[in-house]
């Protein structure tokens, strides 16, 4: 079975970082069928500011109007995806660049208003919640030895593009493919406790507790929600790791997540990820 690797946009911010990520991807792909999902984060923010727009967030999630969506598509599907695919090719891999619109692997519905951690309601705009169940395109590409590289853009049933959180899309694809392993790689060494120290391991009940207490906040809420969704679909090898400069994502420092306690916590809705944050979408 395959591995889903999610790369945070902070790991793709310059040519050296893209090259290092590509080399680690090729190493990992030599050991397992591999699908890469990536975001854009700071590059999207920088492009928005260059266009005279201000990035807007709530609970670490991007509010996406039409101007922001145009920027998201330009940065993710255009710049970041193409640069990463090219770098993987240079490192010896066979990468194919995709978005969630290709083969409708990122078929999504428009997100309902978000109930924030503080209890307020916020409209995230042109944001998608993945709901498709067809990952045939990914399976076909893996079968012929390719590395699908998916920019986190979704599409609705009418063909309208939507901004989808990269962590959420990675968790969804891990569930649908299905994958054996989910690795979420970013700029932080895993999940941090209230003192800023890496938590070595977490089970599902501990995930819920960290989100409800606010110890896990902003972008980490989406990451933990994606892990919880993957657990609900039977993915058992899940980790959140430091990806910057790593040569091996499987041994990188970070947090390993355990499915123990899932039965007590109950099933999770793909859009919900816990009572503290009823919808988890948008920014990378």
Image (cartoon, helix red, strand yellow):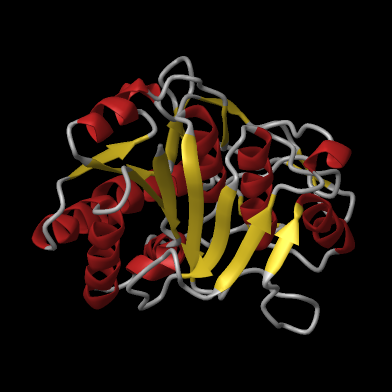
Closer to the camera in the image, 23 or 50 = 23
Residue drawn at the location 22% of the way across and 73% of the way down: 15
Q: Position of residue 138 (x, y in %)?
A: 32, 30
Q: Residue at x 36, y 45 (%)?
A: 151
Return the x and y of residue 274 as percentages of the image width and height. Answer: 80, 44
Which quadrant would the N terminus be assigned to in this image? top left
In the figure, is residue 104 to the left or right of 217?
left
- 244, above or below 119, in the image: below
Q: Is residue 94 visible?
A: yes
Q: What is the tally of numbered marks visible in this picture?
A: 0
Q: Residue drawn at (72%, 57%), measured in percent from left and top? A: 59
Q: Quadrant of residue 266?
A: top right
Picture residue at 40% right of the left edge, 75% below the top = 244
Q: Is residue 247 above or below residue 284?
A: below
Q: Quadrant of residue 77?
A: top left
Q: Nearer the viewer, residue 30 or 199?
A: 30
- 230 lies left or right of 154: right
Apparent side of residue 280 relative to residue 70 in the rendered image (left or right): right
Front-most of residues 70 and 182: 182
Left/right placement of residue 102 relative to residue 275 reads left
Can I make out residue 65 in this image?
A: no
Seen as rendered, the residue at the extreme top is 158
Percent x, y for residue 128? Answer: 56, 34
Position in image of residue 262 (x %, y %): 78, 42
């Amino acid at each position: 079975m395959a591995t889903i690797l999610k790369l945070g946009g902070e790991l793709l911010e310059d040519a050296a970082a893209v090259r290092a990520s590509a080399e680690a991807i090729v190493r990992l792909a030599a050991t397992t069928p591999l699908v890469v999902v990536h975001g854009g984060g700071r590059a999207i923010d920088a492009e928005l500011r260059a266009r005279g727009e201000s990035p807007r967030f709530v609970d670490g999630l991007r509010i996406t109007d039409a101007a922001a969506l145009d920027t998201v598509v330009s940065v993710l599907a255009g710049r970041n995806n193409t640069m990463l695919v090219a770098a993987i090719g240079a490192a010896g891999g066979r990468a194919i660049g995709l978005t969630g619109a290709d083969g409708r692997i990122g078929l999504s519905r428009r997100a309902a208003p978000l109930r924030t951690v503080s209890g307020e309601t916020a409209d995230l705009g042109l944001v998608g919640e993945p709901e498709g169940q067809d990952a045939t395109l990914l399976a076909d590409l893996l079968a012929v030895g390719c590395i699908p590289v998916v920019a986190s853009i979704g599409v609705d049933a009418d063909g309208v593009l939507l901004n989808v959180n990269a962590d959420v899309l990675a968790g969804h694809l891990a569930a649908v493919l299905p994958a054996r392993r989910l690795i979420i790689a970013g700029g932080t060494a895993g999940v941090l406790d209230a003192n800023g120290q890496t938590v070595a391991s977490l089970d599902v009940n501990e995930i819920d507790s960290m989100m409800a207490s606010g110890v896990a906040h902003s972008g980490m809420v989406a990451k933990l929600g994606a892990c919880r969704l993957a657990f609900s679909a039977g993915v058992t090898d899940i980790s959140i790791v430091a990806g910057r400069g790593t040569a091996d994502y499987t041994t990188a420092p970070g947090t390993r997540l355990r499915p123990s306690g899932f039965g007590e916590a109950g099933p999770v809705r793909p859009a919900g990820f816990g009572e503290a944050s009823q919808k988890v979408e948008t920014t990378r």
